[in-house]
Amino acid sequence: MSKLEAADNSLMDRPAELMRGASESLAGRVNFIHMGGLNCGEAGTDSRNRLWLRGGFPESYLAPFDEVSGRWRRSFIVERGGRRYGFERSVTEKPGVTHSMTIAKEDLGLDMVYLIYPGGLSFSLRDGMEAPGYARIPEFRFP
């Protein structure tokens, strides 16, 4: 690994620290843009299945192979406001709590696990676990 790659990796491990430092040292001269993933309008309706299977984040969606995309998605945890959120997807229209969700919630210290499924409703599965339907994703907001 080159010195430049090592520096890039060490910086990427500390995003909150970098943002705090940038906002303090560049006060009034820096803007942070928060971006979501691709949606059907951007990816195109012809790509709906690929978008559903790989997700809307460019690194996953544009990966050359499903295996590469899957490896990226398996490491997907979102941290917001000191809370940790995990995501799992289901292909069944009657989702339920899975063993992997329970283990992930405990082992990774997740505050909420979302099981995204190909339905139109959103509902609670159990404390700290919800099932938002795929059709409701455009309305999704973190608590």
Image: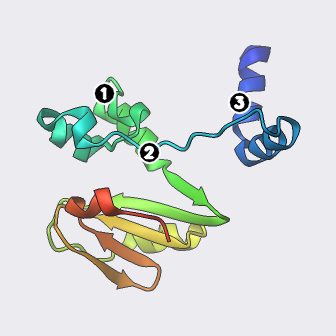
Quarter of the image that includes the N terminus: top right
Mark-to-mark CA distance, 2 and 1: 22 Å
Q: Nearer the viewer, residue 138 or 56?
A: 138
Q: Which residue is more in the foreground, 90 or 20?
A: 20
Q: Amino acid at mark 3?
A: Asn
Q: Is residue 5 left or right of residue 61?
A: right
Q: State if disc 3 and disc 1 touch (CB < 8 Å).
A: no
Label 1: few (<14), some (14–19) or many (≥20) C-alpha neighbours in 10 Å: few
How many residues crowd mark 3 within 10 Å: few (<14), some (14–19), many (20+)?
A: few
Q: Residues within 10 Å of mark 2 (few under 14, many from 20)?
A: few
Whether 1 is drawn above or below 11: the answer is above
x, y percent for residue 123: 29, 79
**Nearest-to-viewer mark from 2 and 1:** 2
- Of 13 and 36, which appears nearest the observer? 36
* Tag 2: amino acid: Gly
- Look at discs 3 and 2 and give the one toward the viewer: 2
Q: Is residue 79 left or right of residue 72?
A: right
Check the image and name the residue furthest to the right: 25
> Which of the 4 quarters of the picture holds residue 108?
bottom right
Residue 36: assigned label: 2
Question: Residue 90: percent from the left, percent from the top?
Answer: 24, 61
- Residue under pointer 1: 65
First reached walking from the N terminus: tag 1 or tag 3: 3
Q: Residue at x 78, y 38 (%)?
A: 28
Taking the image as shown, residue 75 lies to the left or right of residue 93, namely right
Residue 74 higher or lower than 120, as above or below? above
Q: Earlier in the sequence, mark 3 or mark 2?
A: 3
Query: Residue 9, labelled with which disc?
Result: 3
**Residue 81 drawn at (x, y percent):** 65, 64
Label 1 or label 3, whichever lies nearer to me, is 3
